[in-house]
Image (cartoon, rainbow, N blue to C red):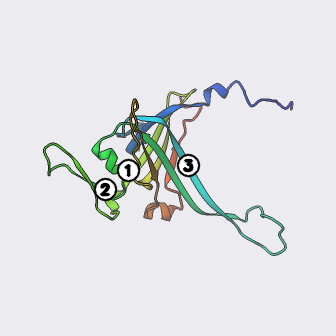
């Protein structure tokens, strides 16, 4: 085998994740129709950022001078999706504040956003999902963070000649189904290269 001095191959141009993508709430995949359905969150600006953080631990053994193969375990997995939301609605602002509620009835002119001072189970979204496109595929790349809720509250910065962008950091959470299966609360739907 001759070693290459670049990673570029005939297939490289088909494997690029392009553009900022779109963000959906409560996205569901239908295996029978091979299609997704969900609610679009809104326009973003500055891209979106996915992180799947893993906390690992090396099991120590007397006499072993470093990490032993097979002796590393995962203690925690925390998937997050930071969304730079430009399209602002009362619902979207409330999503940035864990435990917020929107009162749509008290005023005929305003929706009023307040905090309940606690996070309840129904405050969690079923999921938050990034939907992007792969250069060589007609199918989207879909990354789903399950049982998602905002982890950093609301940060709003305004300036002249610009629109406000609200970063919302959604974190996935385990529920009884994840725990029983031993799976972290995320799924990545990556198109098969021959599924066109």
In the image, which disc is placed on residue 96? 1
Q: Mark 2 or 3 closer to N-term? A: 3
Asked which secondary structure carries label 3, the reply is: strand
Q: Which one is nearer the viewer's eye here, 28 or 78? A: 78
Q: CA distance from mark 2 to mark 3?
A: 25 Å
Locate residue 129: give its quadrant.
top left
Locate residue 161: give its quadrant.
top left
Asked which secondary structure carries label 2, the reply is: strand
Give the crowd class for mark 3: few <14, some 14-19, many >=20 residues within 10 Å: few
Asked which secondary structure carries label 1, the reply is: helix
Q: Residue at x 58, y 54 (%)?
A: 53
Indicate left or right for 110 with 184 as reference. Answer: left
Name the residue that disc number 3 marks: 51
Give the crowd class for mark 1: few <14, some 14-19, many >=20 residues within 10 Å: many
Asked if residue 71 is positioned above or below residue 14 in the image, the reply reads below
Q: Are marks 1 and 2 in contact (CB under 8 Å)?
A: yes
Give the number of the mark in front: 3 or 1: 1
Q: Residue at x 41, y 48 (%)?
A: 155
In the image, which disc is placed on residue 7? none
Q: Residue at x 57, y 35 (%)?
A: 192
* Residue farthest toward the bottom in the current orientation of the protein: 62
Give the number of the mark in front: 2 or 3: 2
Indicate left or right for 100 with 180 as reference. Answer: left
* Residue 60 position within the rendered picture, expressed as x and y whole percent measured from the top left: 75, 71
Q: CA distance from mark 1 to mark 2?
A: 8 Å
* Residue farthest toward the right in the current orientation of the protein: 2
* Residue farthest toward the front in the current orientation of the protein: 160
In the image, which disc is placed on residue 100? 2
Asked if residue 176 is positioned above or below residue 108 in the image, the reply reads below
* Residue 138 position within the rendered picture, expressed as x and y whole percent measured from the top left: 50, 27
């Amino acid at each position: 085998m001759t070693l290459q001095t670049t990673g570029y191959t005939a297939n490289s141009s088909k494997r690029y994740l392009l553009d900022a993508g779109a963000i959906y709430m409560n996205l569901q995949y239908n295996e029978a129709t091979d299609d997704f359905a969900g609610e679009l969150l809104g326009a973003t600006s500055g891209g979106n950022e996915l992180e799947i953080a893993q906390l690992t631990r090396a099991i120590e053994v007397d006499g072993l001078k470093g990490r032993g193969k097979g002796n590393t375990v995962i203690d925690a997995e925390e998937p997050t999706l930071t969304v730079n939301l430009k399209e602002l609605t009362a619902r979207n602002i409330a999503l940035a504040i864990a435990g917020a509620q929107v009162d749509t009835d008290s005023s005929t002119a305003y929706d009023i956003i307040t905090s309940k001072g606690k996070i309840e189970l129904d405050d969690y979204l079923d999921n938050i999902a990034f939907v992007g496109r792969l250069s060589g595929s007609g199918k989207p790349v879909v990354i789903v963070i399950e049982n998602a809720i905002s982890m950093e509250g609301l940060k709003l910065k305004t300036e002249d000649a610009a629109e406000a962008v609200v970063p919302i950091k959604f974190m996935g959470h385990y529920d009884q189904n994840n725990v029983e299966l031993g799976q972290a609360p995320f799924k990545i739907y990556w198109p098969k290269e021959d599924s066109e």
